Amino acid sequence: MIASTLATVATLLACTITTSAHVALIPNEAEMGSNFNLGFKLPHGGEEAGTVAFTVTLPEGTYSVKPRPVYGFSVSRTLRELVPDVEVYGSMVNETVDTITWTAVYGYEVPTWAVEVFEIYLTLPANQTGTMPFPAVQTLSDGDVYEWITGNSTMGPYNGTAEAVVVDEHAGHRRRREVETAPVLTVVAPTTAA
Ligand SMILES: *[C@@H]1O[C@H](CO)[C@@H](O)[C@H](O)[C@H]1NC(C)=O
Ligand SMILES: *[C@@H]1O[C@H](CO)[C@@H](O)[C@H](O)[C@H]1NC(C)=O
Ligand SMILES: *[C@@H]1O[C@H](CO)[C@@H](O)[C@H](O)[C@H]1NC(C)=O
Ligand SMILES: *[C@@H]1O[C@H](CO)[C@@H](O)[C@H](O)[C@H]1NC(C)=O
């Protein structure tokens, strides 16, 4: 009993340490064709500065994307054209969201001792499973920039290194830039009810 409790505590600690080093997706697995909220939980692993901007680049195969406003931040988006049009739940769509950026309004930041989850609502393709990196860029108030951007998608038609569009050059300068692997969503087939 005590041994298993200790093992559980050890497992929890191990998880806390690994996930705190990266942007975590909540959830990190979804069923194909689903509409759901995807959260990006930001790390503050021993940083001295809070978060003042966060940008997500939407991978191929994400549709009907809507960001959730976050307290203290303005939110903006850019669109990209779909060629050819794509059928999403019976409607043909010709454009989709390319990037979403949350930018702190003057003087605001997510402090290092706080947690913030940036959320988007999106639709996945009905007939595809695979892995989908969501390149993300986090900017801190001291000018440090974390680019969580590398990784490959296995979802057609996109195949290749996830390319992030870096749109936040907060305060006009970068102090330090770190490039890390992008958080990855695993898209699975629906589990059929028995
Ligand atoms: C998509 O279609 C709408 C409505 O026809 C049009 O206003 C918009 O400009 C089109 N977008 C692109 C990227 O072509
Ligand atoms: C998904 O696959 C089914 C069966 O093959 C097909 O009827 C349907 O059109 C496909 N849906 C999309 C969005 O491609
Ligand atoms: C992504 O694919 C490229 C080209 O195949 C490869 O060089 C690179 O190592 C891959 N990256 C990851 C993180 O798997
Ligand atoms: C993408 O790459 C994966 C892994 O190499 C491959 O299985 C898949 O068929 C590719 N998809 C497309 C659309 O090329």
Image (spheres, rainbow, N blue to C red):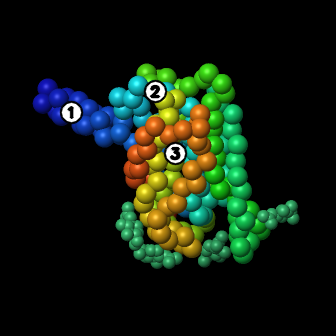
Amino acid type for the residue under numbered disc 2? Ala
Q: Quadrant of residue 124?
A: bottom right
Amino acid type for the residue under numbered disc 3? Val
Q: Residues within 10 Å of mark 2 (few under 14, many from 20)?
A: some
Left or right side of 49 for 109: right
Q: Quadrant of residue 79?
A: bottom right
Q: Inspect this view and state whether residue 26 appears.
A: no
With respect to residue 175, does 193 lie above or below?
below
Q: CA distance from mark 2 to mark 3?
A: 15 Å
Q: CA distance from mark 1 to mark 3?
A: 31 Å
Residue drawn at point x = 42 percent, y = 35 percent: 43
Residue drawn at point x = 43 percent, y = 40 percent: 176
Q: Residues within 10 Å of mark 1 (few under 14, many from 20)?
A: few
Q: Earlier in the sequence, mark 2 or mark 3?
A: 2
Q: CA distance from mark 1 to mark 2?
A: 29 Å
Query: Quick one: 146 or 20, which is closer to the camera?
Result: 146
Q: Where, quadrant-wise, is the N terminus in this rendering?
A: top left
**In this figure, which residue is indicated by the disc labeled 1?**
10
Q: Which mark is residue 86?
A: none
With respect to residue 12, does 169 lie above or below?
below
**In this figure, which residue is indicated by the disc labeled 3?**
137
Tell me, yes or no, whether the two marked residues, 2 and 3, touch with CB atoms within 8 Å: no
Residue 26 is situated, as x and y percent measured from the top left of the image, at 48, 43
Left or right side of 100 for 1: left
In the image, which is nearer the foreground, mark 1 or mark 3?
A: 3
* Local SS, label 2: loop
Q: Earlier in the sequence, mark 1 or mark 2?
A: 1
Residue 87 is situated, as x and y percent measured from the top left of the image, at 72, 69
Amino acid type for the residue under numbered disc 1? Ala
Quadrant of the rendered image holding ligand 3: bottom left
**In this figure, which residue is indicated by the disc labeled 2?**
49
Residue drawn at point x = 23 percent, y = 30 percent: 9
